[in-house]
Image: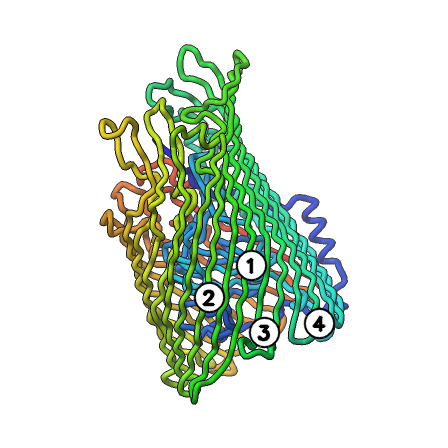
Amino acid sequence: MSRVQFQATPARSTSLRIPARSALALAVVLALPAAHAAEAPDAAAAEVNELNRVVVSATRTERQVQDVPATVNAIDRERMDNEMVRNVRDLFRYEPGIDVGANRDRFGLGDIRIRGLGGNRVRVLVDGVSVSDSFLIGSFSNAGRNFVDLDTVKEVEVVRGPSSALHGSDALGGVVSFVTKDPGDYLKDGAKTYFGLKLGVESQNEGLYGGATAAFGGERWSGLVVVNHHQGQETENKGTRDSLDGSRTKPNPQNSDGRSLLTKLVYAPSENQRFRLTVEGSEDQTDTEVFTARGTALSMPGAPAVRVLSQNGDDHQTRARVSFAHEIDSLDSVLADSLRWQVYRQDSETTQRTREERVNVSNNPSPTLRLREFNFDQRVYGAEATAHKDFATGSVEHTLTYGFEYEHTDFRQKRDGRAINLTTGAVSNTISPDTFPVRDFPVSQTRNAGVFVQDEIRFADGKFRLVPAVRVDRYELRVKPDAIFTTDNPGVKVSDLSKTSVSPKLGAVWHFAEDWSLYGGYQRGFRAPPYNDVNLGFTNLQFGYTAIPNPNLKPETSDGYELGLRFSGKAVYAQLSGYYNDYKDFIESSRQVSAPPQTPLIVFQSQNVAKARIRGVELRGGVDFGELSPSLAGWSTRFAAAYSKGEDKTADRPLESIAPLTATVGVAYDRDVWGVELAGRFAKRKSDLPAPNRFAAPGYGVLDLLAHWNFAPGAKFNVGVFNLGDKKYWDNGDIPGTLAATSTVLDRYSAPGRNVGASVAVSW
């Protein structure tokens, strides 16, 4: 039994080839009168000192990074624009310790990994609502989590390390919180209306994107509409072999397009409260000609060898959300000073279709057309509330934060297909080892309910902060096996599941001297047993194997410890932290637990087996040279580095998901209306692989050049040239786990060469 997964991401030529219609559109935008334009909504003064940024995710209260007992990153809209961010990989391009892998053959960007932990072990939120889970099985089914159009986002916060005390299940590795744009971000200085246009191009995938934003406001009501569209082809790499089979190293041809909509309506009955209705949606479509799948294919034991003549992928994903929120900044109550609550519904769906022609390699070729369809649907209903109360006990000040979260989620997954004999016209719903349709887990429902409380205790005029917190979560899984599942899994008994978890944390920040502080603490993380692992099901009598449920799965847990030192001065800021995370009861899917003669069939089952340890050191900082000398006004630098080491303590081998030592350095010069930055990205060779014959990503160093120009009031031009030296290199997260060091297709997984991105935005 084998459930194989291909890995991939786009790729293309380094030339900036803009279609005629794109060039015309760009010329039109550049010609738009900008003289009457209002200030850009994101034109806040650049903040060199990142420790002064205000974040919410780490403590659910608005606090500067230097007052938070955790390692937190915040990326605002201005930085996203200046760095030409188009997707989550671009978003974390200069953030060592945060990685985004990719499937280079077809499916594109994968999960976000924080300190080596990714997949559904990182909680990804949009305005407090969880993004759909990832799910993959086999070579033709890969539902990812790349559902967020970053052009609708104004800020991203990342909490590194276990965060379950405030964010519950799935925050085992950390939290990525996207905050979408709001009418108030555009209606500045009493403005009643705002309109903006943005258009951009990128050479690495011959991409074109554009968007329009409109906002209005009055004494009580305000609203926002953001519409975006993007299109492109495969992302380039450094491969040169243009063959039409598995020996190909150039990227598979792709065409992609997508669109998104964000609307908000805000009613403010007073200065201290707001009601907010949000409706947002996105849709993405990618068509791939999978040349790399052509050629002799693996077949089942005893079956004739086959040759794949063609394979095409049609991948479509959608996400839609509606939420209603209420915020009260000043509440005259003994229980709370402020309150925020929201209710929401979100639907996410991934549909992937594969069309494949193949022929037997024998005297009787028997050409066959295989049509497969994979569908993964997730629907979430939820509610949450958070309250804050400030009070004092003597000379000690407290900020009490407490609240609850509730989510009800429906999961459906199905694989379907048929094989058509192109000689006889015979149609069969059997494509070994499956007889379609099949479900790999039964229709399922989960209910997650959590309550949390946190107290920020401030001593010595705020110089010392102690932050204890605890959360209790109740997780329930209910399954509804239908005819599709029971037919595919005769005699398999599925199980419901209920678990309760308690997640404590204790953090502290000590400002022991002017500009200096220590921070750190302990935090427990957990992840509830996933629906698909509890009741994973597939049976194939022909090949003698079956998978059975495991109602005894335990939650995955972690114990995380962190200690850090910060310096935050006018000219220089720096942060050095070390962490140690111990993980227990990792769930291994489809583990073989028995075989004949012990049992009639080979039996697979998801089990708690792995114990893992990840530890590391992270450094980040910057210098504003203008604060050191007036003659250096405008000059600044920023730097960051991350080193991690991880071991699978059960198997006594290194963890493959750990990235090598990585670092970034940027030197910038900014004036009132323009700025430029030379940024470097560096990585050490990946050395700690579990198998000696595996391909290890070599070390590399590449330079990028970024520039922006506010060429008129409310008009801004951004440009970036990436990989200036046109260097061939590999990102560790793009390399499949089965790629041998002697493989002849290594260049297929290489990163893009020199490429250019540019955008222009105007607003009124």
Q: Which of 178 and 197 is in front in this view?
A: 178
Mark 1 or mark 2, whichever is nearer to me: 1
- Disc 3 designates what residue? 45
Q: Which one is earlier in the sequence, the residue at label 4 or at label 1?
A: 4
- Disc 1 designates what residue? 383
Q: In whole angstroms, how far apart are the C-alphas of marks 3 and 1? A: 36 Å
- In the image, taking residue 24 as reference, residue 292 lies left or right, namely left
Q: Which one is earlier in the sequence, the residue at label 4 or at label 2?
A: 2
- Disc 4 designates what residue? 269
Q: In whole angstroms, how far apart are the C-alphas of marks 4 and 1? A: 23 Å
Q: Which amino acid does label 4 sit on?
A: Pro
Q: How is the image coloured?
A: rainbow
Discs 4, 1 touching: Cβ within 8 Å: no
Name the residue rendered at 45%, 66% in the picture.
Answer: 452
* CA neighbours of label 3 inside 10 A, class few (<14), some (14 to 19), many (20+): few
Q: Is mark 3 on a helix, strand or loop?
A: loop
Q: Which one is earlier in the sequence, the residue at label 3 or at label 4?
A: 3
Q: In whole angstroms, how far apart are the C-alphas of marks 4 and 2? A: 34 Å
Q: In whole angstroms, how far apart are the C-alphas of marks 1 and 2? A: 26 Å
How many dots with numbers?
4
Position in image of residue 100 (x %, y %): 44, 52
Q: Residue 43 carries which label?
A: none
Q: Nearer the viewer, residue 616 or 291?
A: 616
* CA neighbours of label 4 inside 10 A, class few (<14), some (14 to 19), many (20+): few
In the rendered image, is residue 251 in sight? Answer: no
In the current view of this chain or complex, which residue is farthest to the bottom?
A: 394
Name the residue rendered at 36%, 84% in the picture.
Answer: 512
* CA neighbours of label 1 inside 10 A, class few (<14), some (14 to 19), many (20+): many
Discs 3, 2 touching: Cβ within 8 Å: no
- Disc 2 designates what residue? 73
Q: What element carries label 4?
A: strand
